[in-house]
Amino acid sequence: MTSVDRRLALRLLAIAALAVAIASAVGFVAGSIVYVVSMAGASENDGWAELGAAIFGVVIGGGMAVIAYVVTVVVGVRRTQPAGERARPAVATAALPFAVWGAGGAISAPLGYHAPEPVVAAAAMLTFVAVVVAFGALGGVFRGRRFVVLAAITGSAAVVLVGVAGVVGDRRERDERRDVIADIGTLPLVDGTTIDRPYPDWILRRVDHSSYDRSLDITWDVNEGGDAHLRIDRDGSYEVIVHTTEGLEREEELRSRMRQVSAKRFLEACGRRC
């Protein structure tokens, strides 16, 4: 028995390629039909109706494409594999693209804009290898303990790289945020002393910045429901917005409590949030 069943691998590759082609065609046709039918009674100038029809078409077309892919894989494996050797290859081939998509989402979810791209790319490649090898072993293409070990090693290395990219990205983002604060120079601070809890029922959620316009946005969660924002522009001007039932009253009160302080004092009050 060889470690790699090449004949099975080629069969499953051909089935997967055919399934992708059929699924793409079915999804496109189904989505187009849904779009045309949805727009049949709508005005040509109704942008909202057009957007809704497009979204509905994408959802239905995507669902039909998934069904077509799975059905094609199952039928293809049934016709090419002998009885008793169909379940594992069918499950592995049908689930592989969704596992790759899910793994890619798991990688990107904890990473921000500032994560180093080479590290992220390496993590993505290792994750892809780990998933393909694991599902190849599940489907019977790869046989032997060494492939399980390979999947475990590459998957673990990907997790480590994602962690490294996250730490480096967070550090870069923090450095940029502190540079934004330093560039603004003079910023408003509640009572000139605090940013954490301007009111007992307000909890600081985050201090964020914009790389585009070098502005700062401070967000509080309000226990009574809603949230509040302090937006500081690069010239030091600011705007207070409170989304609660007493929003206008709180906005006026908070504005009256604002005191301009230096960037250094603001960073001291902000602490690790900045």
Image (spheres, rainbow, N blue to C red):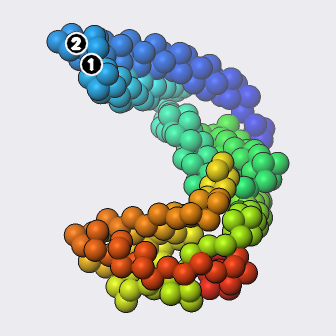
**Residue shown at 39% from the left, 64% from the top:** 241
Q: Is residue 165 above or below residue 18?
A: below
Q: Is residue 52 above or below residue 110?
A: above
Of the 4 image quadrants, the one containing the N terminus is: top right
- The picture places residue 72, in percent across and down from the top left corner, at 45, 21
Element carrying mark 1: loop
Disc 2 and disc 1 in contact, CB within 8 angstroms? yes
Q: Is residue 97 above or below residue 221?
A: above
User: What's the amino acid at mark 1?
Assistant: Asp
Residue 236 quadrant: bottom right
Residue 45 quadrant: top left
In the rendered image, is residue 69 in sight?
A: yes
- Which residue is labeled 2 in the image? 43
- The picture places residue 153, in percent across and down from the top left corner, at 77, 59
- Which residue is labeled 1 in the image? 46
User: What's the amino acid at mark 2?
Assistant: Ser
Q: Is residue 202 above or below residue 47?
A: below
Element carrying mark 2: loop
Crowding at dot 1, Cα within 10 Å, few <14 / some 14-19 / many 20+, comes out as few
Count of residue discs: 2
**Residue shown at 52% from the left, 64% from the top:** 238
